[in-house]
Image (tube, helix red, strand yellow):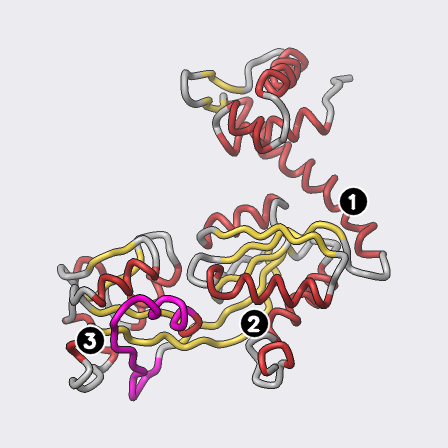
Amino acid sequence: MINISIRQLRYFEALAVHGHFGRAAEACAISQPALSLQIKELEDTLGAPLVERGPRHVTLTPLGETLMHRARAILLAVQEVGDLARAAASEISGPLHIGMIPTIAPYFFPEVIHALRQHFPKLDLVPRESKTKTLVEELKAGRLDIAIMALPLHDPSLQEMALFEEEFLLVRPPSHRSQPVPRLESLHKASLLLLEEGHCFRDQALDFCNITPDSNPSLMEGSSLSTLVQMVGAEIGLSLIPEMALPIETQSADVCVSRFEQNQPTRIIGAFWRKTNPLGTSLEAIAKVIGALRSEDNPLTSA
């Protein structure tokens, strides 16, 4: 019988994620020699190498690739056994790994953390900001419990719950204040500033404006909403930003902000978690608290 420990699988999964012994050891809160020893013992047990060791990066061998998928399934199952006990408790408690996309996190995380601490004082909140693709991967791997992202995702393994709807606003240079608000469908002719590839907000904006990157040679990109707004203030172009970003991002930029007279673009923000997560009922209660923060009759926002 092969003797493999959960700890070895956890260390190997971290190495597969980070591709580097040092970063994997840091993520596991152990020394690099200790992690290397555990990986070596795992390879000795299996009788074959799991990684190809390079000077700056490690690459999984075919056996390593196979073991990575099996290890993640095993680790997720072990985690869900512990979550069963948490789900049976009378009060929601313990660590909660919560993720948000970058076009929400800077503006909404402080509010969410404050509300969850009030409603669930025994929760240990572990926030995480990343793009949609990464958050989905971490949800499925069990590294996240719940994520706040834009709908829809159309992923059958995830439970989704709509929380609130948010408008996109048009941000123009200060010299445009006297000019009428352009129609949304006419923005394909403008010098439009959008987030770089990988952001769902970028895809939504392109869809609203009926634009493909190839059809608009004047399309420009930024790495953050803050960068986009500053570029608009410098008279470089126009941009769209979500309404919740407005109070923060326009503080240090002289820009003109407008709503569209017709076809006002919006997005729906929702909460997502694995359908198989034993904490599903608790996560739904948490999602309701988060969604209430954008409700007009919410006491936390109206106080």
Q: How many marks?
A: 3
Inspect the magenta stretch and tell me whether residue 216 lies in it: no
Query: In the rendered image, which residue does mark 1 sit on?
Result: 81
Q: Is residue 247 above or below residue 76?
A: below
Look at discs 3 and 1 and give the one toward the viewer.
3
Q: Give whichever of discs 2 and 1 has the lower sequence position.
A: 1
Q: Amino acid at mark 1?
A: Val
Label 2 element class: strand
Tell whether 155 sits left or right of 88.
left
Tell whether 265 sits left or right of 10.
left
Mark 2 → mark 3, Cα distance in angstroms? 35 Å
Inspect the magenta stretch and tell me whether residue 247 lies in it: yes
Image quadrant where residue 11 sits:
top right
Mark 3 → mark 1, Cα distance in angstroms? 57 Å
- Residue 235, given in percent of the width and then of the height, sits at 16, 67
Q: Amino acid at mark 2?
A: Ala
Q: Badge 1: how crowded within 10 Å, few (<14), some, or many (20+)?
A: few
Q: Give whichever of discs 2 and 3 has the lower sequence position.
A: 2
Query: In the rendered image, which residue does mark 3 sit on?
Result: 174
